[in-house]
Amino acid sequence: MPSDESPRPKGFLRAVVPYLTVLVIIAAIYCGWTLYARWQSRVQDEQAIQEKKARADASIAERLGNGSLKIVAFYADPGIIRRGEKGLICYSVANAATVEIEPGVEPVKPSLSRCVTVAPTKDTHYTLTAKDASGHAKKAVTDVKVQ
C-alpha cells in the first residue's frame, strides 16, 4: 500500500517558517518605509506650495497697496504710432473710487486691468488721476508719440 507521507523530509516546515517570517517582516518594513517616504514628500511639497502661495499673496497685497490708493500700472501700447493709427492707454489701480485720464478719453472707471483706445493726431501727454473715497489722489503720466 502506498503511504500518504509527504515527499518532504520531516521538519522541513519547521526549518522554513522562520525564514519566511523574516522575509515577510522585511517586506512589511520596506513597504512601510516606502509609504512613509512618499507621505513625507507629499507633506513637504504641500508646505512648499503653501509658502509660495503666501509669498505671492504678500506680493499682490504689496503691489495693490495694502488697502491704500495705488496706481499699479499706467502705460501706452505702443508708445509710438503713425498719424491716423490707434493705440491703447492701459491702467491698473487699486483701492480707487474714481479714475480720470486727461486729455479726455472715453469714460473710465477704477479697474485692476483696463485699456482704452486713443487716436492722437500729435504727440500727447496723458495723465491718470485716481482718487480714493477719502479724497486722496495719485497721478501717473505716459506719452504717445505720433510720427
Image (cartoon, grey):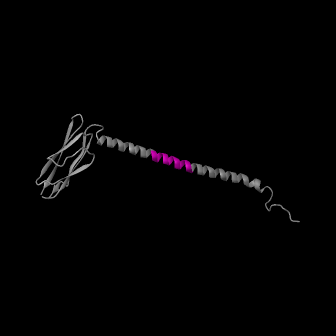
Taking the spot 13% from the left edge, 58% from the top edge, the residue there is 84
Which residue is depicted at the point 36% across and 44% down? 56
Q: Is residue 40 above or below residue 8?
A: above
Residue 21 drawn at (x, y percent) = 69, 51
For the C terminus, the quadrant is: bottom left
User: Which quarter of the figure is the N terminus placed in?
Assistant: bottom right
> Residue 120 placed where, x, y %?
13, 53
Q: Is residue 1 left or right of residue 97?
A: right
In this rendering, the count of numbered labels is 0
Name of the residue lying farthest toward the top: 134
Q: Which residues are magenta?
A: 34-46
Dominant SS type (magenta)? helix
Residue placed furthest toward the bottom: 1
- In-front residue for pair 70/24: 70
Identify which residue is drawn at 27% across, 48% down.
Answer: 113
Between 105 and 54, the residue placed more toward the observer is 105
Relative to 8, residue 132 above or below: above
